[in-house]
Image (cartoon, rainbow, N blue to C red):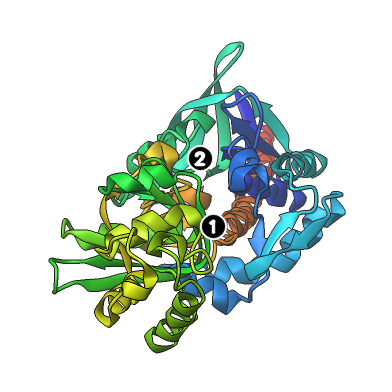
Amino acid sequence: MKKVQVLVIGGGPAGLLAASRAAQMGASVLLVEKNKMAGRKLRITGKGRCNVTNAGEIRQFIEQFPGQGRFLYSAFARFFNEQLCALLEAQGVALKTERGGRIFPESDSANDVADALVHYAERSGVRVWTGTEVTGLRFETGLVGRRIIGAEIRTKKGLEQVEASAVVIATGGLSYPLTGSTGDGHRWAKQAGHRVTDLRPGLVPLETRESWVSELSGLALKNVEASLWAGPQGQETCLDRQQGEMLFAHFGVTGPIILSLSRAYHEAKEKPVTLRIDLKPALTPEVLDQRIQRDFLKYQKKQLKNALNDLLPRALIPAVIQAASLDGEVWVSQLTREERTRLGKTLKGLTLTIKGTRPMAEAIITVGGVDLKEIDPKTMASKKTEGLYFAGEILDVDGYTGGYNLQAAFSTGWTAGGAAATQALKTEARLREARTLTQIEVPQDRKEDDDDSEN
């Protein structure tokens, strides 16, 4: 049987930071990862570029996690973007800040970030076992409740028992299952007495019913506003709106603002959902109409289909004309005011019918996880089982795109690792003290027995 003070399960961003922090505090740490290399999912984030964090303040970060942000306050206070950037740069990873405060490695290589974090863990004293799968956790039930005592793992040599004073579960959610996120951690959380909230895809593309969308596959729209609406026609309510960049795909729509909107899709509760795209969010309807009139004056000798090049990408023009119920062959000079107004309304609200999200395997993150009410936000410790900690995507906390979710993983990992090491070292100290007392008392008893025998 192998004995360590802290066992970390999962070699992603949360697990690597948890293990590193625990080792730095003096604990003996073993990190086990079932893939052949650690950080496999991290290596493909941001299309391989890895948006490691955001330059925003803590308050801004909290706002990016709707309904759950306050839970992260303590973790962010302990380890935030400045500390993460300093850590990475100390490991030789130069960083840059892009639009929206998004921070990337200068190399645009997620592999550089993952490799740096693995080396950081190893230099901190962490033993990293890859190709090693945890098959089950081991618990002990006493007078004060359930306590974690270790795990059973499968290595290349077979099954082995690991005894640990503290265990950090950082196995991720269900997204990108080929990277190892297969829900093992949720199963162990339930085994430890935790409630796991409903799991569903988050930051995921949306599928649409309109067939013309597939013809625009690959077309990117910048500086547009997209809003998600739920309810029957005429009674819709806005679920959320985002402004930025989106992309058409063969199945529907994707891109940063669509991924952020996808979280709100599940709030529709089976009501019909539509997506409205404001192609000119910087212009009021009145100003936009004036702009259209100027363009029509400029192209008055052209057909409508050839008079919108200054307003729209060429590939999008037929779809907008069709959505406005106009004839693209008509001469601009023949358009009525009512038809021009209809065009303006379409430009301010191109509507698509949403039929669902793409599957979990295509989601960037998992929505849902271990119930936050059962986790101590100051330590990431389980309130159900002593010695058990959670970090990263396995928790029921998810945010918008922009580097926020990775920072949450790093921060909760750092917090969990530090707390796990503190508890493990205290447990070890208590055991040493108990052994010392036993060693002192036994000789004293023997001495008294010897004195009695001489009398």
Sort mark 1 into few (<14), some (14-19) or many (20+) by Cα contacts within 10 Å. Answer: many
Residue 376 tag number: none
Is 23 displayed left or right of 362 in the figure?
right
Q: Is residue 57 visible?
A: yes
Q: Is residue 322 left or right of residue 296?
A: left
The front one of 284 and 15 is 284
Q: Do tag 1 and tag 2 residues touch (Cβ < 8 Å)?
A: no
Residue under pointer 1: 405
- The quarter of the image holding the C terminus is top right
The answer to which of 107 and 349 lies nearer the viewer is 349
Q: Residue at x 77, y 61 (%)?
A: 96
Instruction: Tell me: residue 72, above or below residue 162.
Output: below
Amino acid at pointer 2: Thr
Tell me the kind of residue under disc 1: Asn
Query: What is the spatial separation of the Cα atoms under label 1 and label 2, in whole angstroms?
Result: 15 Å
Q: Is residue 370 left or right of residue 420?
A: left
Measuring from the top left, give residue 39's x and y in whole percent.
64, 38
Residue 171 shows which numbered tag?
Answer: 2
Regarding mark 1 in the picture, which secondary structure is present there? helix
Q: Which residue is depicted at the point 27% across and 49% down? A: 210
User: Residue 430 in the image: x percent, y percent?
Assistant: 62, 50
Position of 439 with respect to 405 (left or right) is: right
